[in-house]
Structures are given as C-alpha cells and as structure tokens.
Image: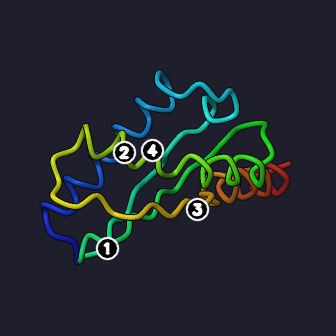
Amino acid sequence: MQTVKLERLNNAFMEQFNIIFGTEVKNPILKNVIVTSVQITNDLSYAKVYFTCFDLNREQVLKELKESASFLRGEISKRVEIRHTPELIFLYDESLEYARRIEEKIKEINE
C-alpha cells in the first residue's frame, strides 16, 4: 500500500513530466508523449514512468526517452522537492490500447 506522501510524489512527477513534454522539450518526437502514471518505489530509488504516444513508433519514442533520461531527471529535480531524484524507468502504457481493443470487441458483439 502506498503512503499519501508517495502518492503525492507520483502525481507531482506525472504533472511535471506532462508540462515538460508539452512545453520544454525540443525533440518533436517527445512533444507527443503523454505520461499516464508514475510509480515511485518505496525507497525512492526508482520511478516507473508509464507513457503513451499516439500515432508514433513506440520503440523510437522509448529510445528517445532513454536518451533524454538525464535531462528529464534534472528537470524533475528542479521542479519537485525531493532529496534524491529517483532513476527513471520508462514503460509503454498498454492499458489504453487494451481498452480500445475491448471496445472494438464489444461493438463487434453488439452488431
């Protein structure tokens, strides 16, 4: 179970990532990234950053994110008060795609 502090940090990270991707990054590929959730480990050493990107090659986006990880980590450390900024692990969020496939199956069944 996550603590309230950890939940607040997760939300703060997600909010700041979306601001950074929307306004700060110069890479056009990363401008289309949307962070859907962040899960920071209890010891604050790692942050799993779940993202989605519409109409883009997810492998290319993941490669760009990994190359930009140190920049992104630095930006987060400036914006969120935390003693030690966790290492970032980027993961594609499959849940939106999964939900879309379920919707399509439901439509097929109803027809």
Residue depicted at 45% across the width and 64% down the height: 48
Q: Sequence-wise, which precedes: disc 4 or disc 3?
A: 4
Say which of marks 1 and 4 sits in front.
4
Q: Which residue is mark 3?
A: 91
Say which of marks 3 and 2 sits in front.
2
Residue at the far top in the pictured view: 23
Q: Sequence-wise, which precedes: disc 2 or disc 1?
A: 1
Q: CA distance from mark 4 to mark 3?
A: 15 Å
In the rendering, at what x and y percent does residue 79 appear? 25, 37
Q: Disc 4 marks which amino acid? A: Leu
Residue depicted at 33% across the width and 63% down the height: 86
Q: Sequence-wise, which precedes: disc 3 or disc 2?
A: 2
Q: Which residue is mark 1?
A: 41
- 11, above or below 43, in the image: above
Q: Disc 1 marks which amino acid? A: Thr
Q: Sequence-wise, which precedes: disc 1 or disc 3?
A: 1
Marks 4 and 2 close (CB-CB < 8 Å) = yes
In the rendering, at what x and y percent does residue 21 appear? 51, 32
Q: Which residue is mark 2?
A: 74
